[in-house]
Amino acid sequence: MFLRPAEAANLAGLSTRAIYRAIQRGELRAVRLCSRLRIDP
């Protein structure tokens, strides 16, 4: 099961924007499924 960025942000206590920045920096791994980002918990 994969998480959406908003779900990951909620679990981590961060903003969605912070999650997207972490993905861009390579600090958080994410995959694209059907052109949408998904995060492996």
Image (tube, rainbow, N blue to C red):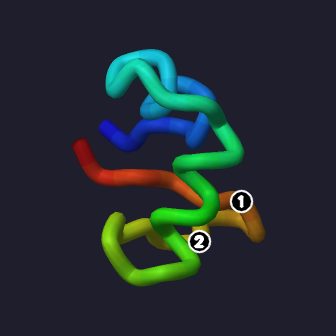
Q: How far is disc 1 from disc 2 in space, using C-alphas?
A: 5 Å
| Residue under pointer 2 | 32
Q: Is residue 22 above or below residue 38?
A: below
Q: Is residue 26 above or below residue 17?
A: below
Classify residue 18 as left or right of residue 27: right
Do callouts 1 and 2 mark residues in contact (Cβ within 8 Å)? Answer: yes
Give residue 19's position: percent from left, percent from top. Answer: 53, 49
Classify residue 41 as left or right of residue 20: left
What residue appears at the point 58 percent right and 48 percent down from the top-left corner? 18
Give residue 32's position: percent from left, percent from top. Answer: 59, 71
Residue type of the residue flagged with mark 1: Arg
| Residue under pointer 1 | 36
- Number of disc labels: 2
Q: Quadrant of the C terminus?
A: top left
Q: Dot 2, how many residues are within 10 Å of its Cα: few (below 14), some (14-19), or many (20+)?
A: few
What residue appears at the point 47 percent right and 71 percent down from the top-left corner? 31
Give residue 26's position: percent from left, percent from top. Answer: 39, 82
Residue type of the residue flagged with mark 2: Arg
Q: Quadrant of residue 1?
A: top left
Give residue 35's position: percent from left, percent from top. Answer: 76, 69
For residue 26, which numbered disc appears in the image? Answer: none
